[in-house]
Image (cartoon, helix red, strand yellow):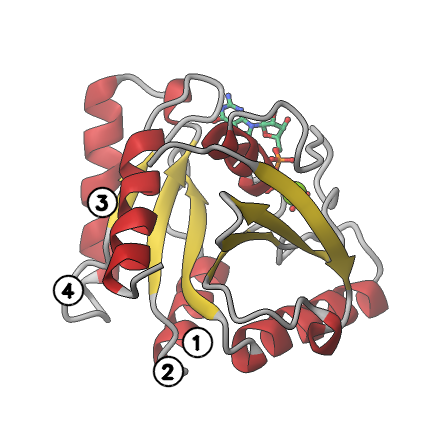
Amino acid sequence: MEIKSAEFVMSNSDVAKCPKSMLPEYAFIGRSNVGKSSLINMLTNRKSLAKTSGRPGKTQLINHFLINKNWHLVDLPGYGYARVSKSAKKTFQKFITQYFSLREQLVSAFVLVDIRHDAQPIDLEFMAWLGENSIPFSIIFTKADKLKPNAITRQVETYKNKLLETWEEMPNYFITSSSKSIGKEEVLDYIDSINNSMNI
Ligand code: GTP
Ligand code: MG
């Protein structure tokens, strides 16, 4: 899919105030610092459409971006960031779960995990929660530029085996690097194929 336009729409902490339009949307979620905002910039060919930072906890709101005037990408705050206060963490957690439970326009989520790390309980729990709530998702392995090809294969295999302990099959997954633009076409073509199947 070619990205012809990408525009920031709005930021919210309340799912009820998110755009009312029924355009299909795709949300990026995962631990703080995993590379959600960077991935959105990579996918849209924009350097700073979504704000990124080396320090975790940068994205603190639900951010909607309108792509090609007919679908939304959503950048969310990370979960599991230890350095924000307990009350801030609870607030984030609440609006993230509200977003996923209430947002009818959500077509699919992308759960981002850093390819360098073994499966983390918080990610597995979040995926289980999505499954229990019948929310479709794919996994996006990020920062693939940090590993050599055989280490990438090894990490993905290990991750698969871990997931297959609880899941019947491995969810759809992508290997990406925002700094090296790896996986861009695959993710965009996947979104495009879903949009096409909905006549978008
Ligand atoms: P929060 O908004 O804090 O939840 O973080 P985030 O998941 O949006 O992460 P962000 O995109 O802000 O990136 C976090 C850090 O990881 C930044 O320093 C990025 O430059 C770096 N980073 C993101 N993606 C990649 C990647 O593909 N490769 C490498 N090497 N670094 C990356
Ligand atoms: Mg972010």
Crowding near the residue tagged with mark 3, few <14, some 14–19, many ≥20 C-alpha atoms within 10 Å: some
Q: Are marks 1 and 4 in contact (CB under 8 Å)?
A: no
Quadrant in which residue 158 is drawn: top left
- Residue lying farthest left? 169
Which quadrant would the C terminus be assigned to in this image? bottom left
Residue designated by label 1:
129
- Residue 76 against residue 101 in the figure, above or below: above
Please report the residue visible at 63 percent of the width from the left and 57 percent of the height from the top: 80
**Label 2 sits on what residue type?**
Glu
**Label 4 sits on what residue type?**
Glu
List x then y, in percent, for residue 102: 57, 81
Residue designated by label 4:
169
Crowding near the residue tagged with mark 1, few <14, some 14–19, many ≥20 C-alpha atoms within 10 Å: few
Q: Earlier in the sequence, mark 3 or mark 1?
A: 1
Q: Earlier in the sequence, mark 2 or mark 4?
A: 2
Which quadrant would the N terminus be assigned to in this image? top left
State how far apart marks 1 and 4 are (Cα).
16 Å
Crowding near the residue tagged with mark 2, few <14, some 14–19, many ≥20 C-alpha atoms within 10 Å: few
Q: Earlier in the sequence, mark 1 or mark 4?
A: 1
> Element type at marker 2?
helix
State how far apart marks 1 and 2 are (Cα).
5 Å
* Residue 152 badge: none
> Element type at marker 3?
helix
Q: Earlier in the sequence, mark 2 or mark 3?
A: 2
Please report the residue visible at 33 percent of the width from the left and 41 percent of the height from the top: 187
Residue designated by label 2:
132
Residue designated by label 3:
158
Q: Are marks 1 and 2 in contact (CB under 8 Å)?
A: yes
Looking at the rendered image, the disc whose residue lies closer to the viewer, 2 or 3, is: 2
Crowding near the residue tagged with mark 4, few <14, some 14–19, many ≥20 C-alpha atoms within 10 Å: few
State how far apart marks 2 and 3 are (Cα).
23 Å
Viewer can see residue 33:
no
